[in-house]
């Protein structure tokens, strides 16, 4: 951050109103409040203060200015956030953002080179048939560029690359393969879809055949995918996550499809938060990412039996983890690519709008496999439904579904409830409450003093002249940093101070703790002096206890008398307050 001047930072902040910027990422209400995007928030605890150009959450303690919001929300560096906001405001800026070093950088350089090579191929003379194939599939140039679609030929790319890169590395990341002691390009005569991770690194490729007449007789598979390598692990990646992630964070929703073309087609009609699974498996790594994104999930897998079973399998996992999940349902066509091409955007918009909660989707599926006129099948269905309801962690949703099931089949609710386990949700909350940090009066005094110092310039002077110290080292370090900032610049502003300590993790954690404790900004001089007195008394008691310990440890009578006199003197000074 040293090479970014304070003047430039101030200009970027002054030309990016914090309400406008944050409002472009999350939904703010009329009072500039929202569910906090930095923790699992259930009531609006996140506030934006346009007068101070800051935000803060009184639940998790996150706070900062427009730059730190973009930095934390998008998971990028301070410098990258500055660049985004400068571009947004039309400020010409030349920031040399340091590239993250990675042990796989040499592999990423190769895959990036290969990707550019494939892209150039598509728009060369060799790419005419491939471009026609894509055009026939309603994939235009804009989509080609957005998804970096390319073309592999049969001109021995590995020999070209071997002039610059180690052949062993090409084999390791599956750009080339060795068969019977001969080296071949992994992808030949195929339309190429690069797989790109969240950090915009090309980590693998998927190649689709398109010359049906030439290839069909050779028995080649429709797709060839990169083998799993050190940089490409299917269980950890979603296709199109590089493009979709900012939209997922903004909408707090992720749409999951089964195929590349489904994702491309949906993006083409505005569903920019869409990704695809790399195969049909949904893994614990995928789940961890969704939990990290803090988003709802919309499942949009194929409408055939395999897709339905995949939807139920994934939905069950999400439901067990208390994630809001719904399902898009439509008739006549196997997948969303075919559906949108044949019925259009408006029809798909209706299907999206009418998506159904996953539990309803699953119950409908279970019912479709039973004869509802047969009492034995009805009994089996009800037992399957109860088993599914047991997976719901949301007690209110569970109660509603019990009522629906009871009403539909005229069964007493108590019969169903007797077969449903009581969730452990209350016990979990109790455990969380027990582990929550408890503050004593000294902690509260320090937190309140620092909170007011962060919000009022005059409290900094009052603290510096009237007290000058705190109990805990981390709190004292923050107080000194506040004073240092004010002495250096002649004023104090919380928004600017956040930039000043942006690279100090310890101080940022202390601020988060202060903001997490609920504070009111109004204060009186008497209140502040009471906090000061509490800290003074702590310091005095600590000193007296130290003197008493010395008295107990010494055998020298004169030393004992000297220490006792010191204690009496301190007590007399206290009485004079």
Image: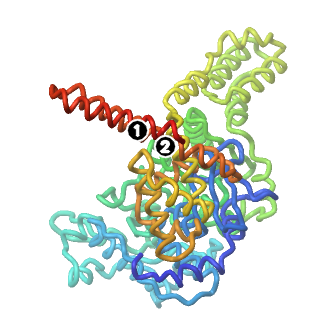
The correct choice, above or below, for 225 with respect to 317 in the image is: below
Residue that badge 1 annotates: 570
Secondary structure beneath disc 1? helix
Q: Of label 2 and label 1, which has the lower sequence position?
A: 2
Residue 228: assigned label: none
The residue to which callout 2 is attached is: 535
Determine which quarter of the picture holds residue 247: bottom right
The percent position of residue 157, horizontal first and vertical second, equals 30, 79
Q: Which quadrant holds residue 126? A: bottom left
Closer to us: 296 or 365: 296
User: Could you say which is closer to the camera, residue 545 or residue 235?
Assistant: 545
Circle 2 Cα neighbour tier, 10 Å, few/some/many (<14 / 14–19 / ≥20): many
455 in relation to 471, above or below: below
In what quadrant of the picture does the N terminus appear? Answer: bottom left
Label 2 residue SS? helix
Q: Nearer the viewer, mark 2 or mark 1?
A: 1
Write the residue at 63% across / 80% down. Answer: 88
- Residue 524 in the image: x percent, y percent? 69, 51
Residue in view at x 31 percent, y 69 percent: 101
Compared across the picture, whether 251 is left or right of 111 comes to right
**Quadrant, the C terminus:** top right
Q: Identify which residue is drawn at 45% across, 49% down.
A: 470
Q: Is residue 311 visible?
A: yes
């Amino acid at each position: 951050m040293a090479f970014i001047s304070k003047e430039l930072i101030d200009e970027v902040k002054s030309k990016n109103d914090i309400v406008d910027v944050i409002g472009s990422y999350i939904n703010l209400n009329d009072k500039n409040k929202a569910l906090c995007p930095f923790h699992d928030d259930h009531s609006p605890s996140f506030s934006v203060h346009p007068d101070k150009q800051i935000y803060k959450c009184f639940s998790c303690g996150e706070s900062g200015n427009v730059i730190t919001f973009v930095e934390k929300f998008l998971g990028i560096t301070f410098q990258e956030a500055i660049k985004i906001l400068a571009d947004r405001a039309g400020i010409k800026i030349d920031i040399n953002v340091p590239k993250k070093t990675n042990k796989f950088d040499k592999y990423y350089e190769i895959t990036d080179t290969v990707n550019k090579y494939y892209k150039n191929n598509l728009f060369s003379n060799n790419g005419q048939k491939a471009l026609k194939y894509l055009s026939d599939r309603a994939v235009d140039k804009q989509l080609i560029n957005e998804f970096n679609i390319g073309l592999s030929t049969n001109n021995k790319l590995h020999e070209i690359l071997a002039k610059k890169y180690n052949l062993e590395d090409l084999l390791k990341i599956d750009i080339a393969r060795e068969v019977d002691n001969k080296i071949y390009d992994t992808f030949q005569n195929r339309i190429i879809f690069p797989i790109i991770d969240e950090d915009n690194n090309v980590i693998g490729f998927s190649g689709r055949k398109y010359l049906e007449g030439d290839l069909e007789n050779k028995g080649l598979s429709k797709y060839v995918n990169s083998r799993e390598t050190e940089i490409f692990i299917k269980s950890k990646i979603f296709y199109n996550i590089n493009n979709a992630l900012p939209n997922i964070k903004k909408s707090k929703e992720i749409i999951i499809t089964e195929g590349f073309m489904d994702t491309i087609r949906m993006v083409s009609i505005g569903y920019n938060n869409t990704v695809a699974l790399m195969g049909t498996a949904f893994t614990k790594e995928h789940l961890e990412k969704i939990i990290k994104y803090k988003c709802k999930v919309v499942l949009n897998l194929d409408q055939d039996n395999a897709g339905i079973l995949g939807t139920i399998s994934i939905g069950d996992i999400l439901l067990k983890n208390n994630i809001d999940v719904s399902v898009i349902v439509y008739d006549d066509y196997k997948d969303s690519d075919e559906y949108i091409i044949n019925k259009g955007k408006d029809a798909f918009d209706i299907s999206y709008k009418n998506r159904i909660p996953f539990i309803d989707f699953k119950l409908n599926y279970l019912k479709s496999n039973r004869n509802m006129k047969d009492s034995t099948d009805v009994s089996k269905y009800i037992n399957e439904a109860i088993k599914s309801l047991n997976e719901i962690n949301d007690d209110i949703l569970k109660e509603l579904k019990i009522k629906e099931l009871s009403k539909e089949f005229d069964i007493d609710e108590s019969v169903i409830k007797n077969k449903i386990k009581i969730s452990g949700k209350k016990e979990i909350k109790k455990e969380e409450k027990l582990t929550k940090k408890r503050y004593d009066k000294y902690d509260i005094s320090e937190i309140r003093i620092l909170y007011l110092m962060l919000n009022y310039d005059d409290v900094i002077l009052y603290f510096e002249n009237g007290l000058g110290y705190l109990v805990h080292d981390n709190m004292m370090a923050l107080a000194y940093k506040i004073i240092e900032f004010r002495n250096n610049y002649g004023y104090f502003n919380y928004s600017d101070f956040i930039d000043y300590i942006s690279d100090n993790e310890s101080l940022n954690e202390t601020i988060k703790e202060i903001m997490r404790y609920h504070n009111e900004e109004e204060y009186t001089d008497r209140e502040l002096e009471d906090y000061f007195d509490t800290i003074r008394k702590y310091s005095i008691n600590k000193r007296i206890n130290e003197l008493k310990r010395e008295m107990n440890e010494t055998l020298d009578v004169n030393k004992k008398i000297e220490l006792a006199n010191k204690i009496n003197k301190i007590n007399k000074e206290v009485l004079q307050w």
